[in-house]
Image (spheres, helix red, strand yellow):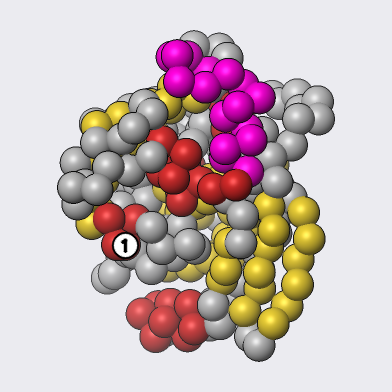
Amino acid sequence: MIEGKHYSRREFLKVAAVAGAAIVVGGGLGDLLAACAGGKTTGTTRGVGTSTATSGATTITATATTVALQPIVVPTVPAKVPDYGQVDPATGLHVIGTPVAIDITSYRLKVDGKVAHPLSLSYDDIRRLPKVTATLNLVCPGFFADTATWSGVPLTTILQTAGIQPDAKEIRMNGADGHYSFLNLKDALVPENFLAYELRGDTMPLLQGFPLRAALPNQSGSPWVKWLLEIVVD
């Protein structure tokens, strides 16, 4: 259920579908990440709708879906949590941050601050929004570089649906573990950014940020906030 008085579910999905349309991923992103990580990054983007390749870029016309969602198995904290910065054998990815088990039935992603329509989105609300998939390098300079395929909702869909006020300059993303990051509005609205809820086609593991984490291809690892609870537009 979407809390608040601004949108009914149907109205929200309709507005979000418009906000999420025409997501464009340029061909230069892979080169940029490869230069930072010292390797090659492969990238694909998949939306709910029609995909047309044009001149090295992929344009996705995305629409919100109202079909029944597949049930998920809520991940739990594993019996053995790798030490900070070590590799999780279950995923082959490094573990950073303090894992937080979140009650998915009461979970809400809050979007507030300098917005016209503050949002409070359940996990299923988020999964019904336009969806993209991309294979990205997650780089913590001097520590590690992980490559994985993530899926989720474009950050622009969320922000544009909330309605950013003209004097807004940045966003702050707050995680349940106490970690937060700032992005100026220009960087936040890069169309490649999304909020991931799947890893390699499956529900996001808890150690990687279930239920939701930021996936920011043009940023180093620190702003990729895990266990995301709130986006504040300042």
Where 104 falls versus 29 (above or below)?
above
Which residue appears at 61% of the width and 72% of the height? Answer: 43
Amino acid on which disc 1 is placed: Asp
Residue 7 location, x and y as percent? Answer: 52, 22
**Above or below for 214 versus 42:** above
Is 7 within the magenta? yes
Is any atom of residue 30 visible in this view?
no
Residue 210 visible, this orientation: yes
Q: Name the residue under label 1.
A: 187
Q: Horizontal and vertical percent for residue 136?
A: 53, 65
Front one among 211 and 23: 23
Residue 90 in which image quadrant: top right
The image shows residue 147 at horizontal and vertical percentages of 53, 65
Magenta-tinted stretch: 2-17
Residue located at (74% from left, 50% from top): 48
Report helix, strand or loop for mark 1: helix
